[in-house]
């Protein structure tokens, strides 16, 4: 007997991003007591080959290990699986094919929020790691309903001087420096016409948010978390109605 | 094929305490990259009947739901299971019997740390919820190696005026008030001779720590997290040596 609306979180890439995502699921839930929160099973098994190294052709593919974690979640009864890691989405299609369980795509969630915020044919900026941007993960993904996104990316110089050092500063706990660099990168995108900026790396929303960003922001993992909560709540209501 | 040293976290009581425990596991790990962190599978399925209501005889037992979550972890390959919730430990023995998987007991971890800190025959104070204290969860548990603990508990008045409102203030996000009340409660235990105070409720270490407590503190869930990391690392080293 499986739990209705049981969400599977294929985590461990890295463990802190997994915990951060679970926090965002809680934040996205209207709850008055423990029992109001959605049921989650999480595989946080970080012994997965490095995604960025694999993308660069310098290391083993993470796919086999991701499939192993995913199967564990499917066998535990998860009827929807998500992966709170941007780079891991480079292996999304073969992973989903191997698991045969519905999955929500992180980039779809972010694009949907960005279009809702900035409108059709919007000019959307992207702040993410060098690997995420270079892989085309965001720019190659089509927004739903035939909407066309006009992408604005940081220049190589902005990446080297602001985005990458900003992300590194957050990882090292230097919030002031991280805020300053990432605000500068967002401002540059805004100056070139971005109506909203997608934060496509879990470190960035730690320091950049609508309260301090020069351009409205879309936190990709928070967008995914909200969709997970809606999905689980609908599944549980459906089950409660004897569906 | 199961993952060596895979820790099972039977969570959801509540979800925030589960995430907090996962954070403490990360904090307790010497890691330079994702792959250095221990593998965890977490069942955060909060549809478990309220533990405090059940203890008071006012609600269903949570045992059946806890066994269901625990079996899910065992089937996922967890070879050690822990429950990051004090009150849930009132059902520890029947849970362990039903699962047949080794489990680490939260109170044992806390008692071991308290004795290591304050010595044999130490006078140990306890700060926890009314239910945890009234259940005898801590005072009935025997410390290892024949050590005898002299317990010091808050008075009913201290519980009503400081401990319970302090915990409620932390839950409501009022850190200043929570700190003031819980410092006062710790100071009262220190005045009566406590050489260390066990923080037996996940909300308390949010505001009380060795940097601001009038008496040295032992964070029970952090003590459990450290033991989990040691256990997993030993299992993985053993497996790597072809054990």
Image: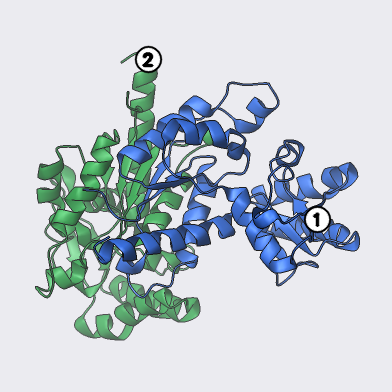
Chain colours: A green, B blue
Instruction: Locate residue A14: give its quadrant.
Output: bottom left
> Residue pushed farthest top?
A242
Residue depth check, mark 2 versus mark 1: number of the one nearer the observer: 1
Residue A233 in the image: above or below residue B122: above
Residue A217 in the image: above or below residue A236: below
Q: Position of residue A175 (x, y in %)?
A: 48, 76
Residue drawn where x is 55% and y is 55% of the image: B224
Mark 2 lies on residue: A241
The answer to whether residue B149 of the structure is visible from this angle is yes
Residue A188 in the image: above or below residue B18: below
For disc 2, the chain is A
Residue drawn where x is 29% and y is 33% of the image: A77
Q: Is residue A237 left or right of residue B198?
A: left
Q: Position of residue B6 (x, y in %)?
A: 35, 52
The answer to whether residue B47 of the structure is visible from this angle is no
Q: Position of residue B181 (x, y in %)?
A: 80, 55
For disc 1, the chain is B
Mark 1 lies on residue: B181
Q: Position of residue A89 (x, y in %)?
A: 19, 56
Residue drawn where x is 87% and y is 42% of the image: B156
């Amino acid at each position: 007997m499986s739990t209705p609306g049981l969400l599977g979180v294929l985590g461990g890439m890295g463990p802190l991003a997994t915990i951060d995502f679970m926090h965002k699921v809680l934040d996205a839930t209207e709850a008055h007591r423990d029992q109001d929160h959605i049921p989650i099973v999480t595989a946080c098994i970080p012994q997965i080959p490095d995604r960025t190294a694999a993308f660069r052709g310098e290391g083993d593919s993470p796919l086999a290990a991701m499939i192993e974690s995913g199967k564990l979640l499917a066998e535990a009864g998860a009827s929807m699986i998500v992966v709170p890691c941007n780079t891991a989405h480079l292996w999304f299609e073969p992973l989903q094919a191997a698991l045969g369980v519905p999955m929500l795509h992180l980039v779809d969630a972010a694009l949907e929020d960005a279009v809702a915020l900035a409108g059709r044919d919007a000019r959307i900026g992207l702040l993410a790691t060098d690997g995420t941007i270079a892989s085309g993960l965001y720019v190659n993904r089509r927004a739903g309903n035939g909407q066309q996104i006009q992408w604005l990316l940081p220049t190589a110089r902005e990446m080297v001087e602001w985005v990458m050092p900003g992300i590194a500063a957050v990882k090292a706990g230097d919030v002031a420096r991280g805020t300053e660099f990432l605000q500068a990168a967002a401002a540059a995108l805004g100056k070139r016409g971005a109506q909203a900026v997608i934060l496509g790396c879990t470190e960035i929303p730690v320091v950049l948010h609508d309260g301090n960003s020069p351009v409205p922001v879309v936190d990709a993992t928070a967008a995914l978390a909200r969709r997970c909560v809606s999905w689980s709540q609908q599944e549980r209501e459906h089950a409660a109605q004897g569906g």
